[in-house]
Amino acid sequence: MGYSGAHQGAVHGCNGPAGDEQEVIFRRKEFKMSSSEIIKKGDFLLPESLKVHYKAYFFPRNELIFAHLNPDSLSRMGAIQSYIWAVLHPDYVEAIMPIGGITAMDPVAKWLFKNMTAAMKSDPAWRNTKGNYYDLPKKDHPNKGMMFGWSVLGQTGLSFDFRNKQSWDVVKKDVFYWESTGDEGAKLLKKAKDYDVNDLIYRNRAGDTYNINGQLHRIKAKTLIIHVENDQWLRYEMAKKAAKKIKGAKLIGFESPLAHYAVFRGPNMVMIDVIDFLK
């Protein structure tokens, strides 16, 4: 599922992402329920794996519900959450603006993230422990596998034409090496430091069962879908299909050499449409 993007989403009048850490704000009316109660209240049941993931991103805070989404977190969570909330609570959610998200995993995305999972599991540290490495210090975790997995994603994260114009000295920093020299794979080191392999394997698996296309007709919210037309992870065709299933939904696409990562520029790229939507 897309590891970037958060894949921002806005619900019920949120005016979009802010800062390096995407913040999605949901207004609460008299909505005083825990995350688990919120899920139980909906008569549409999510897959168990996704329910846990779903709950993890939402926590009430006085008059607002905040969902803080790291730009490199799994799976288009902001946009996915906006779709899910609108499906679960059609009479509560008034408007959604999913940016760079999808409502189901297609073969392109599944192939990509299964390759990422395989890369992470290829690390001897994961294979030797069968994934139970938590009694080891962080330096002995399957960090190489983490770097390998992110490199798999990185190959298609930006447009090929954009990559073609970069020098190898720039590109090699995103390329995985079991044995590296100099600054080979340098940009992947932070991924190994910041992420846990099993966490991403679990989240990739959750995406395998994610599909709410059959429930999109429940959405009553005013809907503006923003999507990168040349996103090589989350194909624009998926956004088109979602828009057709939501009554009155408007889809706006734009192209960018940044491909998938252009999602963070989405609101600025179609600012007039966003302003009109938020009026």
Image: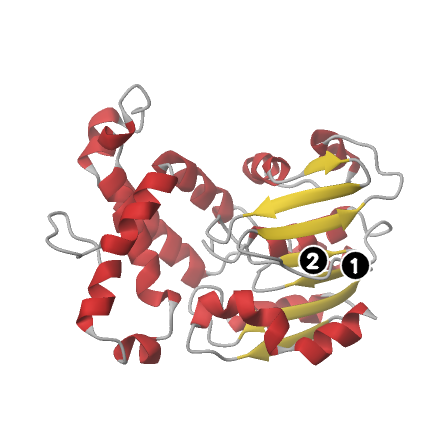
Circle 2 sits in a helix, a strand or a loop, which is it?
Answer: strand
Residue corresponding to mark 2: 10
Depth order, front residue of 117/149: 149
Q: Quadrant of the C terminus?
A: bottom right
* Residue drawn at point x = 65 percent, y = 58 percent: 9
Label 2: few (<14), some or many (≥20) within 10 Å?
Answer: many
The colour scheme of the drawn protein is: secondary structure
In-front residue for pair 232/15: 15
What residue is rendered at 54% in x and 54% in y? 6
Three-letter residue code for mark 2: Ala
Residue on which disc 1 sits = 13
Within 10 Å of the Cα at label 1, are there few (<14), some (14-19), or many (20+) other Cα atoms? some
Q: Measuring 30% from the left and 50% from the top, which residue is drawn there?
A: 149
In this image, 180 relative to 265: left or right?
A: left
The amino acid on which the numbered mark 1 sits, given as a three-letter code, is: Gly
Q: Are marks 2 and 1 in contact (CB under 8 Å)?
A: yes
Q: Is residue 110 above or below residue 276?
A: above
Asked whether, in this view, residue 80 is left or right of residue 190, the answer is: right
Would you say 267 lies left or right of 246 here? left
Mark seen at residue 69: none
- The answer to whether 92 appears left or right of 160 in the picture is right
Answer whether residue 49 is visible to the viewer in this image: yes
Q: Residue furthest right?
A: 30
- Asked where in the image residue 143 lies, by quadrant, the reply is top left
Q: Position of residue 46 (x, y in %)?
A: 64, 41
Residue 42 picture quarter? top right
Q: Position of residue 250 (x, y in %)?
A: 72, 74
Q: Nearer the viewer, residue 277 or 202?
A: 277
| Residue 51 drawn above or below residue 209 | above
Residue drawn where x is 57% and y is 50% of the image: 77
User: In whole angstroms, how far apart are the C-alphas of marks 2 and 1?
Assistant: 7 Å
On screen, 254 above or below 92?
Answer: below
